Image (cartoon, rainbow, N blue to C red):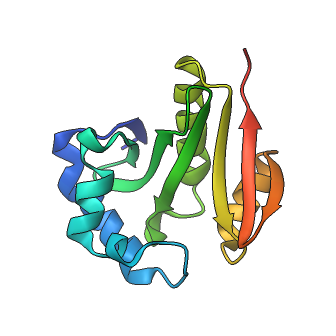
Amino acid sequence: MSLILRRLEPVDLESTLSVAREFIETYDGTWYVDSWLDINNYSNIFFNPTEGFDTFIARFDNVAGFIIGKPADSRIYEIRHHYVMKNYRQQGIARKLKQFLTSYASDNGYRVVHSAVSKDNEASIRLNTASSWDSLPIEEGYLFFKRLPL
């Protein structure tokens, strides 16, 4: 089956929650609010359309990963979470999700996409660097950003 990239739909929720559970179970950093590390709270915040987040998924038979974004203001779109399940890594899925979200932001008039990345998140640092995103150091890591065409 080929990879499908799309906005989260109700039919995807259970499979996407499995991805979120893996993220929560394996998370060992300090960047997230403790309440986000509870699957019910995570779902209510990030997979609830009324909260203003846009969730995009990558799926084969099941959801392999997701990327969650939200407008920071009328010109800037912020990536809040980006995760690919361990058994789907090294297939370019994270890169494809990031490109998909970036295209969505560009198509909707945003000028910049940015993502704060912990200094300990080596995979995300490699992805952003390989994707030629600009970066600025911040207190606990980096702010990666990409200017979008007008």
- Residue 74 vs 21, above or below: the answer is above
User: Where on the picture, by quarter, is residue 87?
Assistant: bottom left
**Foreground residue among 67 and 63:** 67
Question: Where, by quadrant of the figure, is residue 107 drawn?
Answer: top right
Percent position of residue 105, x then y: 56, 28
Q: Is residue 84 left or right of residue 55?
A: right
Above or below, comparing residue 33 to residue 44 in the picture: below
Kindly give the residue lying farthest to the top in the view shown: 150
Q: Residue at x 48, y 44 (%)?
A: 69
Q: Percent position (x, y) of residue 124? A: 66, 63
Which of the 4 image quadrants contains residue 42?
A: bottom left
Q: Residue furthest bottom?
A: 28
User: In the image, residue 119 lies at what x, y percent?
Assistant: 73, 74
Please give the name of the residue rendered at 48% of the width and 72% of the height, measured from the top-left corner: 32
> In the shown orientation, is residue 123 left or right of residue 38?
right
Q: Quadrant of the C terminus?
A: top right
Q: Quadrant of the N terminus?
A: top left
* For residue 72, above or below residue 33: above
Q: Is residue 8 left or right of residue 105?
A: left
What residue do we see at 73% from left, 69% from top? 141
18 or 4: which is nearer to us?
A: 18
Q: Residue shown at 38%/76% (left/top)?
A: 24
Residue 81 image offset from top left, x and y in percent = 49, 57
